[in-house]
Amino acid sequence: MRVHVTTTVGITAIALLVLPACSSHTSTSPAPSFSARSTSPAAPGPNATPLSSASLTERLLDAGDLGNGYTRQLERAEHNDDVTVLGCPALTDLGGDAATGGSLDFPRKAKTAFTYAGSSDSEVSEELYSDTPDKLSDGMRKIFDAMTGCPRYQVLVGGSAVDVATQKTAPPRLGDEQWSQLLTFSAGGHDSVMKQTAIRDGNVLVIVAGSPALVDRHLDKALAKAAPQ
């Protein structure tokens, strides 16, 4: 199966492991490959009407929200690297970008990414989606079901193999539903670890990914700005 990768932190981690064999990668922000735990099903309410992409953009974190030492990553033109996914029938059945954490199929979205203190190993990125609560919940559950069926699989990037391992982590009890996992990319004796945590609050889905410590540090801020009460 051939899919196109459009994540920032995930594909950056893979590219760093396989360079120089694979020299091109995208630098847009990540979308999720989650494990999930929910506290309540989606339900209609005052926040059932989807927000526009413009409104979501205004709710993204900025460098001032994060503090000193953060530099926003500029978006580059997408290269759509071909990635072959091996050893995961559930992801093969799902297909598309979602197999390797590509963009979710919600038209209303916004994204941003930051590097901390100039280190490529200390990145944090945010992606916001909006739709009806039911659609957001259903989309997350579909990815959750696929990912939990594949705790280990392999991707081929530019002819180089990268092993991917996923591990559920306990998400904070925020919003209406929560998803969280650690992803470990391994190649050539080197490992790169990233964390992805997502919170659905009404009609907004907040995804923060990157260095585990930075994700934990800024998740509350992202949710407070994206889905104010």
Image (cartoon, rainbow, N blue to C red):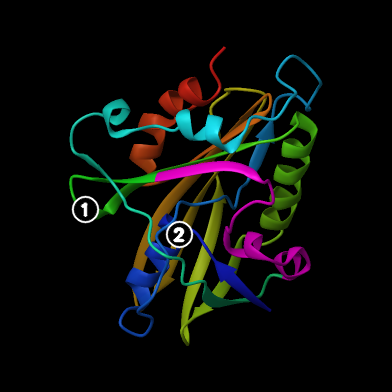
Which quadrant of the view contains residue 14? bottom left
Q: Earlier in the sequence, mark 2 or mark 1?
A: 2
User: Residue 188: x, y in percent?
Assistant: 35, 79
Say what amino acid the circle numbered 2 marks: Gly
User: Residue 152: x, y in percent?
Assistant: 59, 65
User: Residue 52: x, y in percent?
Assistant: 62, 33
What residue would you read off at disc 1?
119
Magenta residues span 89-112
- Which residue occupies the foreground of this view, 46 or 173? 46
Say what amino acid the circle numbered 1 marks: Ser
Identified at 58% across, 38% down, the residue is 53
Q: Is residue 225 left or right of residue 93?
A: left
Quadrant showing the N terminus: bottom right
What residue would you read off at disc 2?
10
Q: Is residue 180 left or right of residue 29?
A: right
Which quadrant of the view contains residue 151? bottom right
Badge 2 crowding class, 10 Å Cα cut-off, few under 14, some 14 to 19, many 20 or more, is: many
> What is the distance, in whole Å, between disc 2 and disc 1 at their CAs?
15 Å
Identified at 73% across, 25% down, the residue is 49
Which quadrant of the view contains residue 38? top right
Reply above or below: 74 against 70: below
Reply above or below: 181 against 63: below
Identified at 53% across, 62% down, the residue is 165
Magenta span has 148? no
Reply above or below: 176 against 82: above
Q: Is residue 172 left or right of residue 64?
A: right
Quadrant showing the C terminus: top right
Tag 1 secondary structure: strand
> Which dot marks residue 17?
none
User: Residue 74: x, y in percent?
Assistant: 32, 53
